[in-house]
Image (spheres, rainbow, N blue to C red):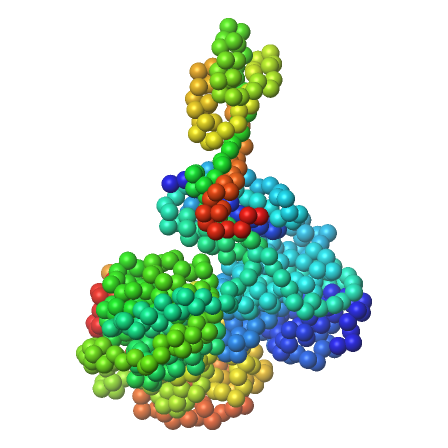
Amino acid sequence: MKKQNMILNGAEIFFECLKQEKVEYIFGYPGGAVLKIYEQLYGVDFLKHILVRHEQGAVHMAEGYAKASGKTGVVLVTSGPGATNAVTGIADAYMDSVPVVVFTGQVASNMLGKDSFQEVNIVGITRPVTKYNFQVRDVNELAMTIKKAFYIASTGRPGPVVIDLPKDILVDKCEFSYPGRIELRGYKPSYSLNQKQIKQAADVLRKSKRPVLYVGGGVISSGGSRELFILAKENNLPVTMTLQGLGAFPGNDDQSLGMLGMHGTYCANQAVNNCDLLIALGARFDDRVTGKASSFAKDAFKIHVDIEPAQINKNVFTNLSIIGDVKHIIAEIAAEIGAPLNFSEWWKQINEWREEFPLSYDSQDGRLRTEFVYEKLFEKTEGNAVIVTDVGQHQMWGAQYFRFVYPRTHITSGGLGTMGFSLPASIGAYFAVKDRTVISVNGDGGFQMNIQELVTAAAYKIPLKIIVINNNNLGMVRQWQELFFGEKYSFTDLSESNPDFVKVAEAFGCRAFSTDSPKEVDSILDKAFSFNDGPAVVEFNVVRDDLVFPMVPAGRSISDMVVRK
Amino acid sequence: MKKTISVLMENRIPTLNRITNLLCGVGLEIDSVSITDTETAGITKMIFIADGEDAVIEQALKQIDKLVDVIQALEFTTSDSFVREMALIKIHQRKNDLNDLTNAVNLLNGKIIDVGKKTITVEITGTPEKIKSAQNLLNNYGIKEITKSACIAVEKESSIIKNKRRIR
């Protein structure tokens, strides 16, 4: 790095900073306000720019990359519509705590606030959906701003940060030096431990008769899966996971109860409902998990471990809160417990629930179902693949039937529930883990929301396995219409209007397959899995009107769970 | 219940925007806001009076504290702090009751700061309750216009010690 103390322009500084942050990929789309950066990009060899086809796709790609790798995803878009197109992705990253840094172009400083061409106040627009955002007003602040952005995005509870770059800043020059460390007066995520609280948690756990570990995405983002495994296995603890927590603990282990909440397993929800100690690890008591919050694990002593103080007592009142890095806290609790614990009586009860209503679907009528597809995918990959789901019924079936074994193998839009997430996010995930199979699973509705990214996958010859679960309906919406809205299937039937997905995929440059027979699933997946010269799209035409069960109706207590139709 | 919230922050305008956005988001009403410099350059103090359920206020306070630019967010109870407000009140000038009015203003520890042809302007400082009662009393003389400052507050030293916080 002999470029220190050199006079550089803003665009050069931009790339020097990304180099310092060890950025490998930028997901971007050029436009008027960022042309100086694209000019500079011409000579840059330390990172690769991935050209997307829509800015929303760029942010989802960065999310997929971040979730699969644990690194920060980077996005570059132009001003105005380029920036507003990115907003859904930014909000998605905000809700699911994904570290991404989004650079938006902006009109020149002297044109700001004048309704200039392609001007939009993106800093104002994204303020409620970013962890932080900046507009750079002076080239001298650029390096420090980028340093701060990466620091804020990736530490504490991760999240998206937007940096707005007026055009003139990219041309202006100043002396470049990259700050080594930064101090922010108002932002000091707590990584230190309070031993007294750890001791108390271990004491309560020792005395407990019916404990449950309720594991969220925080365990994965803190890299605490190993620590969790040791704590749970040494002490015979039942583990249930949220949608974002899947994979934190092996889903094929006996001690995994599967997912809890609205579409969680019967045994996980019963266990949470009847436990005397609930330990929430990096989870946020989301309404899709708790149902009616006041009756959630009503009689249990609740311990909440989280990096963010604002999560404590937000939805559910807890008896003990421990703020800090979940990974270290789990390790400390495990160390504090001492002699291994055993809960055989409790397990007897849990196993009864498990046998009472296991996850099940009709596999005898010869018709193709999503659950079967996931079972086959698990069989083929043995869990050693990254599954990127979209939003809806297929997403819930995936959470239930694909037993995620490893952390960072389940990527989905949980908080915002963004249809169209899967395809671009799976492209991002591919760049993070090139040695693993990446499977994008979509519904026929969501697939059409960012379908343009098929081009991106084809252009970069990405060997994605893209599954389209086609029931010719917006299935989850249809499910709610059937159960709660008088069976008025208003605008959820796509059977008359859906395109021929095989033709569409082929037109975009992908291999394509289609079937509606369970018997053909194996052979078609084999064909798709053995094609590695680009994306393969596999359409599975499934039963139209299946519902996802179990189900806890929204806002109701978990004990009101409906197990089957 | 009304609560006084004191926030120390950087980047005044964007942070104000973030905080008001957040209050809108949780549906919290605020009675007044004051934003001023502090003894430290670059740090702004925002004081606002919020009216809402305790749990909502607690949640809002945590969300505010979480903001990158917020250095500290605290909630003061009335007994833990000094709270003051100022009112400038214009009263219709009627010759016959000037003496009476002067007495009333003195009683309220206020000041007459302007005597015009048509109006008299009175300045009063005190707790929000005192301002309220002054307003009631002066209403008898016919208030033409009233302008109030936002509430400002400072925590009592005894409360800081009680809550084991560092005295800044």
As drawn, the residue found furthest toward the top would be B96
**Residue B57 showing in the rendered view:** yes
Q: Residue at x 57, y 45 (%)?
A: B45
Q: Quadrant of residue A42?
A: bottom right
> Looking at the picture, how far across and down is residue A392, in whole percent?
37, 71
**Residue A494 showing in the rendered view:** no
Q: Is residue A481 above or below residue A499?
A: above
Q: Residue at x 56, y 20 (%)?
A: B111
Q: Residue at x 49, y 36 (%)?
A: B82
Q: Quadrant of residue A548?
A: bottom left
Q: Quadrant of residue B121?
A: top right
For residue A511, side relative to residue A300 (left or right): right
> Looking at the picture, how far across and down is residue A129, in whole percent?
51, 59
Q: Residue at x 64, y 76 (%)?
A: A22
> Looking at the picture, how far across and down is residue A237, in whole percent?
31, 78
**Towards the viewer: B77 or A119:** B77
> Looking at the picture, how far across and down is residue A375, in whole percent?
33, 86
**Towards the viewer: A448 or B54:** B54
How many numbered circles are shown? Answer: 0
| Image quadrant containing the N terminus of chain A | bottom right
| Image quadrant containing the C terminus of chain A | bottom left
**Towards the viewer: B39 or B157:** B157
